[in-house]
Amino acid sequence: MKKVDCNIRFLMLSGAIFAFLAPACYARNLDIDVTSSVTMAYDDNITYSSNDRLGDFVTSLEAGLVLMQKGETHQLSLQTDIIEEIFADHGNFDNTAEDLKFDYKQDFSEHDHLELKENLTHSYEPTSFDDAFGRTTGRYSTLDNQAGLSYTHDLTEQLSAEAHYDNTVDAYSHNGPINSILHQAGTKVNYTWDSANIFDVSYDYFRRLFQNGPGATVNSLLTGVRHYFTAQFYTDIGAGGDFISNFDGKNSIEPHYAGALTDQVDKNDQVSLTFEKKDSTDDYSEVLFNSWRTAFNFDRQISQKLNTTLNVFYGQGHYSDSMISEKFTGVQAQLNYAINPKAKLGVGYSYSDSDSNNGGLSYRKNYYYLNVTIQF
């Protein structure tokens, strides 16, 4: 797997998807939105380092395009953004980031459904707390491309079966980690017991391959249940085992747990709490990452024009065949004000703390920002 310039990959993939969407541009019910935003921020640790810590004022200029089209038997959506980051004092860190999200759903019949997805992100920083947890420290170019398809067949009104395949490519700049590919294939069966209980059983095969290196395999078997306490308040609980063939050839069976509590108050207000514990192949090195993580997410529409969000993340993990462990804490709060139906003002703060027994992997980061978004 050769290292290819991330901008070239982005343009090639964008061109392919736009070509696929070209016929839809002549169809009815096509919604097109163009957005732009300016973000002024102060970042007190642009290097993600504890030893070589640098702070700077950063200006981000973003342009985005959203396409949505819905027909009688299909629907598609495409969102793409280009972000130019300009550093006031450290111009050598100036960069261009891109992301692209594509989703296409097709109903072949009342009981047969196909979905195609593509999610490409090219950035120089983690895009979420979940992404930052377990990440190799430092600033480097990262291209993450996730492509997948799934097919669902409704066997009865209560029973459905799904087959899916996903391919993830992680490519880095020369000063980053080793490139890798992750293959995932699996199946899932859902059974609706009644209006309050839905049961599922899933099997997934994972194969992680590093460039010019060994591979690891995970066979994961999970069972789960979703229980509705009310129409909008529900819990998800899952448990199972992962059968792992590690990069060094060792085999093991590890427990896998997941849970979530969600209150979807209405279309504008939601609160959720999630938890997961598992062993997974690491994106950055040829080891397993044994970890657990929990996250709290709150989204509240205070008034017609005022909205607030709060995200809290905490995780602990350690790497196989080493004594290195990590604790990660992340908090982000944002307040949005709708100036008018086409313009929005946002102000926020984000805190990240990676605490490792290996001092070179630890850092703290404070990020303050103000942005204006305009939709055309």
Image (cartoon, helix red, strand yellow):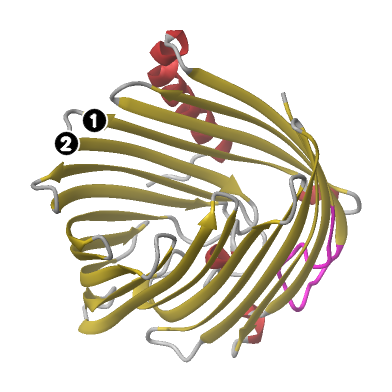
User: Amino acid under label 1?
Assistant: Asp
Amino acid type, residue under disc 2 in the picture: Asp
On whether residue 49 falls in the magenta region, the answer is yes
Q: Position of residue 333 (x, y in %)?
A: 73, 64
Q: Nearer the viewer, residue 279 or 94?
A: 279
Identify whether 21 is placed above or below 42: above
The residue tagged 1 is 107
Calculate the distance from the C-alpha at mark 1 to the C-alpha at mark 2.
6 Å
CA neighbours of label 2 inside 10 A, class few (<14), some (14 to 19), many (20+): some
Dominant SS type (magenta) = loop
Task: Write the residue at 30% across / 67% down.
Answer: 226
- Image coords of residue 220 (percent x, y): 22, 70
Specify the segment rendered in magenta: 41-55
Looking at the picture, does residue 106 appear above or below residue 315?
Answer: above
For residue 138, say whether it is visible: no
- Please name the residue that numbered disc 2 is placed on: 112
The quadrant holding residue 312 is bottom right
Residue positioned 38% across, 20% down in the render: 20
The local secondary structure at tag 2 comes to strand
Q: Is residue 223 above or below residue 202?
A: below
Q: Is residue 195 magenta?
A: no
Q: Secondary structure at mark 1?
A: strand
